[in-house]
Image (cartoon, rainbow, N blue to C red):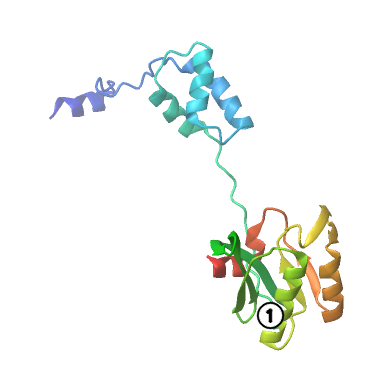
């Protein structure tokens, strides 16, 4: 029999793969690394390397990278519930920056206004120069004329031409938008702050 088999049967340790862990230069700094990553889980390994070097670490950044990869807290993934709106329930509104176009006397920024009927996935858009409340009202009116009707809700992001002030669930919409919604009997709604997936339909359409 091979001598490695004999060693394994007799219970002798394999000298090639010793189970005795050798001390590392990073061991005394490991509690600091773990504590730092608990407070700042997205901190880069190069920044942690600078911090432990200032505290006396003499090892390599490669060893530190491997340890940071092993102890870094896993980011929590948000769970989403896929919902479908009813027919005529909601239209989602957004803008896409196109670029600058030459005009007499200089250049102007060009934007694409997009409105999507969430149930039918039907799109309407127009190019606009100004991102103002009056321009928004004009685009919404033209979209309603094109579709020949109105949804129950308009879903917006949180630009200043839509909402003047927001504190949690307390929202102060732009007066021009409120006046138009009152005339057309449409409810304005806002996405949660920094949650673009709430209006993922029009976001995907623009992309």
Residue 127 location, quadrant: bottom right
Q: Secondary structure at mark 1?
A: helix
Residue 165, position in %: x, y?
83, 54
Most foreground residue, 19 or 145? 145
Q: Give the residue displayed 61% in from the left and 75% down from the top.
A: 125
Residue at far left of view: 1
Does residue 80 lie above or below 177 as drawn?
above
Residue 155 location, quadrant: bottom right
Residue 86, position in %: x, y?
70, 80
Residue 65, position in %: x, y?
43, 29
Residue at far front of view: 105
Most foreground residue, 94 or 80? 94
Please state if 15 lies on the left or on the right of 161 as rendered: left
Query: Does the image show residue 73?
Result: yes
Label 1 neighbourhood size at 10 Å, few (<14), some (14-19), many (20+)? Answer: many
Residue 199 location, quadrant: bottom right
Q: How many marks?
A: 1
Please state if 158 lies on the left or on the right of 47 as rendered: right
Residue at far bottom of view: 148
Q: Give the residue displayed 82% in from the left and 57% down from the top.
A: 164
Residue 192, position in %: x, y?
73, 57
Most foreground residue, 69 or 101? 101
Does residue 154 lie above or below 145 as drawn?
above
Query: Does the image show residue 168?
Result: no
Q: Quadrant of the N terminus?
A: top left
Q: Which residue is mark 1?
A: 143
Please state if 136 lies on the left or on the right of 21 as rendered: right
């Amino acid at each position: 029999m091979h001598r490695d088999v004999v060693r394994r049967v007799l219970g002798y340790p394999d000298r090639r793969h010793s189970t005795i862990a050798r001390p590392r230069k990073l061991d005394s700094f490991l509690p600091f690394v773990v504590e730092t990553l608990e407070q700042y889980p997205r901190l880069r390994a190069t920044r942690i390397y600078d911090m432990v070097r200032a505290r006396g670490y003499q090892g390599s950044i490669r060893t530190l990278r491997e340890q940071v990869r092993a102890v870094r807290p896993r980011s929590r993934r948000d769970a989403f519930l896929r919902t479908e709106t009813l027919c005529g329930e909601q239209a989602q509104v957004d803008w896409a920056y196109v670029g600058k176009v030459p005009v007499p006397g200089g250049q102007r920024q060009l934007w694409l206004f997009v409105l999507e009927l969430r149930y039918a996935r039907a799109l309407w858009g127009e190019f606009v120069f100004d991102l103002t409340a009056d321009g928004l009202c004009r685009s919404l009116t033209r979209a309603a004329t094109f579709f020949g009707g109105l949804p129950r809700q308009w879903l917006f992001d949180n630009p200043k031409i839509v909402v003047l002030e927001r504190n949690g669930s307390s929202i102060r919409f732009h007066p021009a938008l409120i006046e138009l919604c009152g005339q057309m009997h449409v409810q304005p709604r806002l996405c949660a702050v920094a949650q673009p997936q709430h209006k993922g339909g029009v976001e995907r359409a623009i992309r």
